[in-house]
Image (spheres, helix red, strand yellow):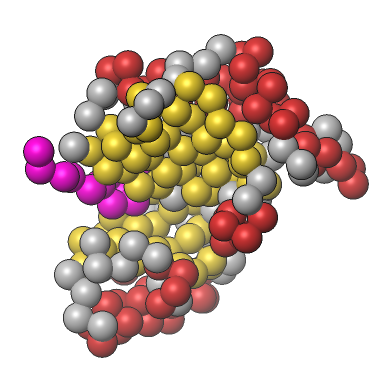
């Protein structure tokens, strides 16, 4: 079986049918950018799966920062001889960074993983796992199993939309029912705030 890996842009396009995804576009020229700051710029290339390791992600707060950072990302791609798909331009979302993943397990078939996301995922190792598919009660249990569950219940005045999160977890857990050839699906991060939740980075491996 041939393995197929979807980059961030293709993964988000795929996920859009199931869950909320950030507004984005893939461009090679500055003048093609239609999204207004604040926004995020990312190098999209199969040669750069860990974009932050090569300074390949930039948060842009103003129009004045846009051109300089866009050209710098193109220069990084040339210098590293990356096979560039383009620069992804993405709406910027404030909120808590979470990870949602699907893995094909040899014993249980597809399982869903949920926990704290961002760059500290591997350090904190705070996550819970269930067999797919799950319901809203399972999703609630997964949230409450986290060591850092306080952040979901108004910690330091920050509120998060738990209904959006539970609905998202349930919908992600159902994806393998339609797409049985998914080997791995990693959404990291899923940004959640008091109003909404959005996928802002993802990677999918199919067999």
Residue 2 sits in which quadrant?
top left
Q: Is residue 201 above or below residue 59?
A: above
Q: Position of residue 129 (x, y in %)?
A: 56, 31
Residue at (41% x, 18% y) in the render? 174
139 or 129, nearer to the observer: 129
Q: Position of residue 51 (x, y in %)?
A: 40, 67
Q: Position of residue 203 (x, y in %)?
A: 35, 47
Residue 167 visible? The answer is yes
Q: Is residue 142 magenta?
A: no
Q: Quadrant of the N terminus?
A: top left
Q: Is residue 204 above or below residue 67?
A: above
Number of marks drawn: 0
Is 202 on the left or on the right of 195, as rendered? left
Is 158 on the left or on the right of 196, as rendered? right
The stretch of residues the image draws in magenta is: 1-13
Q: Is residue 7 magenta?
A: yes
């Amino acid at each position: 079986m041939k393995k197929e890996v979807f980059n961030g842009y293709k993964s988000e396009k795929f996920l859009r049918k199931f869950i909320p995804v950030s507004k984005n576009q893939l461009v090679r020229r500055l003048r093609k950018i239609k999204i207004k700051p604040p926004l995020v710029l990312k190098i999209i290339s199969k040669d750069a799966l860990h974009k932050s390791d090569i300074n390949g992600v930039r948060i842009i707060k103003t129009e004045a920062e846009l051109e300089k950072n866009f050209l710098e990302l193109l220069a990084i791609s040339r210098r590293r001889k990356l096979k560039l798909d383009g620069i992804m331009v993405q709406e910027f979302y404030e909120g808590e960074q979470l990870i949602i993943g699907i893995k094909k397990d040899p014993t249980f078939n597809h399982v869903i993983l949920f926990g704290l996301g961002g760059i500290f995922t591997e350090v904190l190792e705070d996550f819970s796992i269930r067999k797919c598919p799950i319901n809203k009660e399972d999703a609630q249990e997964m949230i409450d199993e986290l060591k850092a569950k306080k952040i979901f219940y108004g910690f330091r005045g920050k509120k998060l939309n738990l209904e959006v999160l539970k609905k998202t977890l349930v919908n992600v857990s159902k994806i393998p029912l339609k797409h049985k050839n998914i080997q791995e699906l990693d959404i990291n991060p899923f940004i959640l705030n008091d109003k909404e939740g959005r996928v802002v980075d993802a990677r999918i491996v199919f067999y």
